[in-house]
Amino acid sequence: MTSEQRLDRLERIVNLMIRAGMRGRTHMRQLDQKIEILIDSQIRHDELFRLNEVKLKEKFLENEIRFAKLAQSQARADRTLERFIRAVEKGRN
């Protein structure tokens, strides 16, 4: 193999390495962009989940208050019904 052939071969190898390096850098940039998109999306969703969690807790507390009021109302209705039943039973006697 002559010096010129060796030089041509080395030039081809260098060109292949340069192209491979460029492809690698392009691929890394694309991966960086995808990772950035994923991170941004995760941040947005974390905020939405946090807001929804706060809303759910508020709704839960509202429901607890409603259930407590309902239980009190039911207890009053039970007492009134018992008084009515006793009054009816006294009327029969």
Image (cartoon, helix red, strand yellow):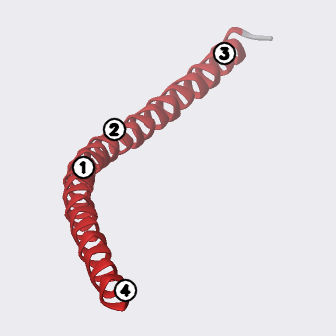
Q: Is residue 43 left or right of residue 29?
A: left
Q: Which badge, 3 or 1, is on the more N-terminal residue?
A: 3
Number of the label disc, if any, that sits on residue 39: 2
The part of the image, by quadrant, that contains residue 7 is top right
Q: What is the spatial separation of the Cα atoms under label 3 and label 4, in whole angstroms?
A: 129 Å
Q: Secondary structure at mark 3?
A: helix
Kindly identify the amino acid type of the residue bearing the numbered disc 2: Ile
Please state the horizontal and vertical placement of residue 44, each as a whole percent of the image.
26, 48
Mark 4 and mark 2: Cα distance apart in space: 80 Å
> Which mark is nearer the camera, 1 or 2?
1
Mark toward the start of the polypeptide (3 vs 4) = 3
Identity of the residue drawn at 45% across and 31% down: 28
Q: Residue furthest bottom?
A: 92
Name the residue beneath numbered marker 4.
93
C-alpha separation, residue under disc 3 versus residue under disc 1? 79 Å
Describe the element under mark 4 as helix, strand or loop.
loop
Q: Nearer the viewer, mark 4 or mark 2?
A: 4
Left or right: 11 as drawn, with respect to 3 = left
Q: Specify the label residue 4 is tagged with.
A: 3
| Residue kind at label 1, given as amino acid type | Lys
Q: Are marks 4 and 1 in contact (CB under 8 Å)?
A: no
Residue wearing tag 1: 57
The answer to whether residue 89 is left or right of residue 84 is right
- The answer for how far apart the CA atoms under marks 1 and 2 are is 27 Å
Residue 27 at x, y percent in the picture: 49, 36
Dot 3: within a 10 Å radius of its alpha carbon, few (fewer than 14), some, or many (20 or more) residues? few
- Which of the two discs, 2 and 3, sits closer to the camera? 2
Q: Residue shown at 39%/35% (left/top)?
A: 29
